[in-house]
Amino acid sequence: MVAGASGRSPLLRRLNNCTYWGLVIPFVAITILVLLAAGSFPNTNIFPTAYSDPKGSYAKEGLLTVRSEYKHPIIIATVRGYLNVDGCKQIQPDNSTTDAIATVTILSENGPGNSSTTLFQLDKANPQMNSWETNFYLNISPPSSFEQGDLCFVVYWRVEYCDYESSISDFPSNTSSFRGTPNFHRAWNYTDFNLASGSNVNWLVRRSHEDRWAWSGHIVGNILKDGTRSCPSLLRERDYSIVIIGDSQPFYMCQHLIWELNSSRNIRCVQVKQTLGNSTTFLAYANELEIATENVVIFNPSGLWEAAYGSIDLFRDNFQRLLDHIPSRRKHRQSFFFAPTTAVHPIVYGDLPDDAKKWSMTQVRVREINNIAVQLVLNVREKRVGDTISLRVLPTPIDALSLNREDDPKTPSDMRHFGTHTNEMLMEAILCDLD
């Protein structure tokens, strides 16, 4: 199942009727109410602060309150699971990321016009100390790869972007919407989940002291006990050929697969840079789609370039035209898969405030590009009945999985490319679904 496809429910949703374009993955609803509010002084940014409800609702159903100076903030929330050794009451919210053995990260989506956003005045004597309250539900379930009681949890959240409008704006953006700090947290127990029904979100899991993460959807049983990976080895020689076409990050993933296999047999990697609005780039993509003879064609239309330097409206038109270059019939069967663009993590790029060229490279734009592309692929697929060449969305939610991996950049300040561990995990997940 692919994050971003239509008809699925948001994982981190505002409590209102505003438009939501977020990650849409099946889930069991558990409710964390997140209230965001804060204040601002002249020439000073007052960052959000955690707030405990005096009536005791802080501990009920994961109720959290944060104060923010932004009226329509977008927040990022991460839930990490830690091995329960001394009981969950002993868990420390500042536990190291390296100690976590389960993790899931979700970005909220906030459109304008939210009626539940209310003004909160910190100091009635000083009207400049105003702040805003914003309501959210975090809808997830605990990882099914562990039994109840195996883990204790910590919820971390921060204001990622100050508002939707600036974070979705096309290049060149006149302001940096990214905030990224500070990070608030609270300990969370298994009983804080609402175990109403049975589906799960896209957790990454691993055994204690392992460096290697796996998608929980590919783990059978309890990973701490009898759990096993349900996927064939990444190193297995496959009887079908693959070509991966895309910009830098898909190319790095493809190159990592060749490096792991120590062979390029049945694997071809094609890198194309620049946005589809560039005629040379468009023709290069179109040509690669037309001439590809591999059994499996995985393509991403320069999603990172489109996020950083493109136009959302132009991408919609150009990607629609690009899909017309995928053949409908050949002598042998082929499968074409659109691969969602992987997540970006501006928090690792310390020079972002001074680099206006990267202000439009936001996760909000990445997600919007993925949503548009998924819908266009589904629309075209409906019209290709009887074709010998299939067109589908890659079943692996690589956008959601890579959102978990801000701690594994290719280089310490690289906000858009991932390190060896993440590239291996993503390719393993993709090939598992294809096999």
Image (spheres, rainbow, N blue to C red):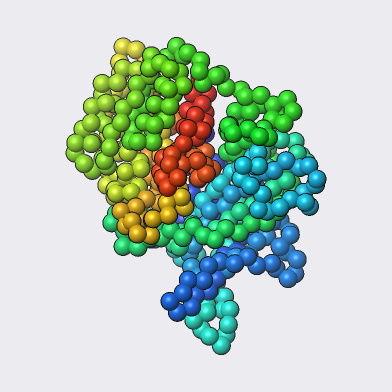
Q: Residue at x 43, y 54 (%)?
A: 350
Q: Which residue is the extreme one toward the front?
A: 412
Instruction: Kindly indicate the quadrant of the structure image that contains residue 285.
Output: top left
Residue sitting nearer the eye, 293 or 189: 189
Q: Which residue is the extreme one toward the left?
A: 279
Residue 422 percent location from the top left of the image: 50, 35
Instruction: Kindly indicate the quadrant of the structure image that contains residue 373.
Output: top left
Residue 398 percent location from the top left of the image: 48, 36
Can residue 213 be seen at all in this image of the molecule?
Answer: yes
Residue sitting nearer the eye, 383 or 132: 132
Q: Residue at x 39, y 31 (%)?
A: 252
Vertical placement of residue 299 versus 94, above or below: above
Can residue 164 be seen at all in this image of the molecule?
Answer: no
- In the figure, is residue 435 to the left or right of 218? left
Q: Residue at x 70, y 68 (%)?
A: 53
- In the figure, is residue 278 to the left or right of 84? left
Residue 320 percent location from the top left of the image: 29, 38
- In the figure, is residue 232 to the left or right of 225? left
Vertical placement of residue 33 versus 44, above or below: above
Residue 187 percent location from the top left of the image: 70, 54
Residue sitting nearer the eye, 255 or 384: 255
Residue sitting nearer the eye, 384 or 165: 165
